[in-house]
Image (cartoon, rainbow, N blue to C red):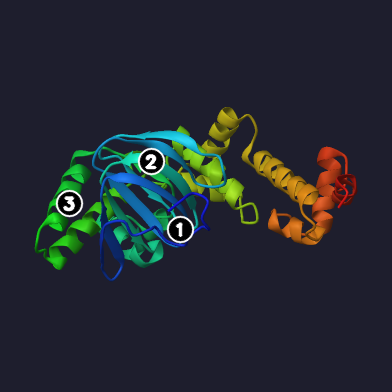
Amino acid sequence: MGLNVPRRGSVPEWGRRIRFDKFSVELVPAGERSFNVRLAKTLATISFSTDEGSSSLAGDRLRHYERRPYEYIVVPANFPLRGESTAAPEVLAFTFRFEDMKPDIAAALQTPQDLLEPRVIIGGPKPFTTQIAQRIRRHMMADTLSRDYLQALGFALIVEMLRLPSRQHATGRGSTLNDRVLDSILDYVDANLDANLSLETLAGLAGVLTHQFGRAFKRKVGEPPHQYVLARRIEAARSLLRTTAHPIADIAYATGFSSQSHMTTTFRREIGVTPAQLRIESGL
């Protein structure tokens, strides 16, 4: 699937996919891959060897990535995924609705449900997740398989990929912001300007304590999260005002402003002109 195709709502089916009541598991073969999806469910993947390519969680900002053998990645629902790899390895891919599995996962982890929330997770390799992934792969490649056994292995691997480090048990969140997770959050902001992009929301997706996230974000990006979000909303709105004939009110809502008057007040304060003035200057 080329990168210029319309965005899909699910991951393409490349290999052998087996569906259970609450999740599906697919053994994706090695080879060239490209994707452009906006996930309707949580996606968790673990690779069997080194992977290298370009990816982005939104927009056109493809970044080079390198993935270690048996590294795993968990991406919440509603994250746009876009990328390509000319020689991707075999990968196990799980899709599931987080809220449907949350009670079972919390019970398996012996963790209160309120400490489990959708977030970006990049982890591994770890001996236990590696061992489970290898068993699942062998079982899925066999001529015959036990669905009950495979379901148990798949659930165990999902649980382990969502397991919190010991330092996060009390709060459900850590105190450090991984650079790769930060890149994912920046892409998420660009793709969801019309959504709730509060400090608490972004920190939750990153799996980092709110005050620690704010400090780390400012240190790495150069400005606080709320200022960064505002700047991206203004930039997106300016582009739409200059290149489209959409009503100003529609542009305001699409870029996260509560109303046309809110956008006008913000533009006047931040850049010294109003949206209407920008539109006149563009000749639209």
What residue is disc 1 on? Answer: 39
Q: Nearer the viewer, mark 1 or mark 2?
A: 2
Establish if 234 lies above or below 108.
above
Q: Residue at x 42, y 40 (%)?
A: 174
Cα distance between the residues tagged 1 and 2: 19 Å
The residue lying at 18 percent from left, 57 percent from top is: 153
| Circle nearer the N terminus (1, 2) | 1
Where is residue 138 drawn, in percent x and y?
A: 13, 52
Q: Is residue 139 left or right of residue 48?
A: left
**Front of the two marks 2 and 3:** 2
Q: Nearer the viewer, residue 258 or 84?
A: 84
Task: Identify the residue shown where x is 89% and y is 44%.
Answer: 281
Residue 274 or 219: which is nearer the viewer?
274
Residue that protrudes farthest toward the bottom in the picture: 21
- Binning the other alpha carbons within 10 Å of mark 3 as few (below 14), some (14 to 19) or many (20 upward) gives some
Of the numbered discs 2 and 3, the one sitting upstream in the chain is 2
| Residue type, numbered disc 2 | Ser
In percent of width and height, residue 60 lies at 56, 43
The location of residue 73, given as percent across then percent down, is: 36, 45
Please state if 249 lies on the left or on the right of 216 as rendered: right
Q: Earlier in the sequence, mark 3 or mark 1?
A: 1
Q: At which x and y percent is residue 137?
A: 17, 51
Q: Amino acid at mark 1?
A: Leu
Label 1 secondary element: loop
Label 1: how many residues lie within 10 Å, few (<14), some (14-19) or many (20+)?
Answer: many
Front-lying residue, 175 or 146: 146
Residue identified by numbered label 3: 137
What is the CA distance from the residue labelled 3 to the residue labelled 1? Answer: 24 Å
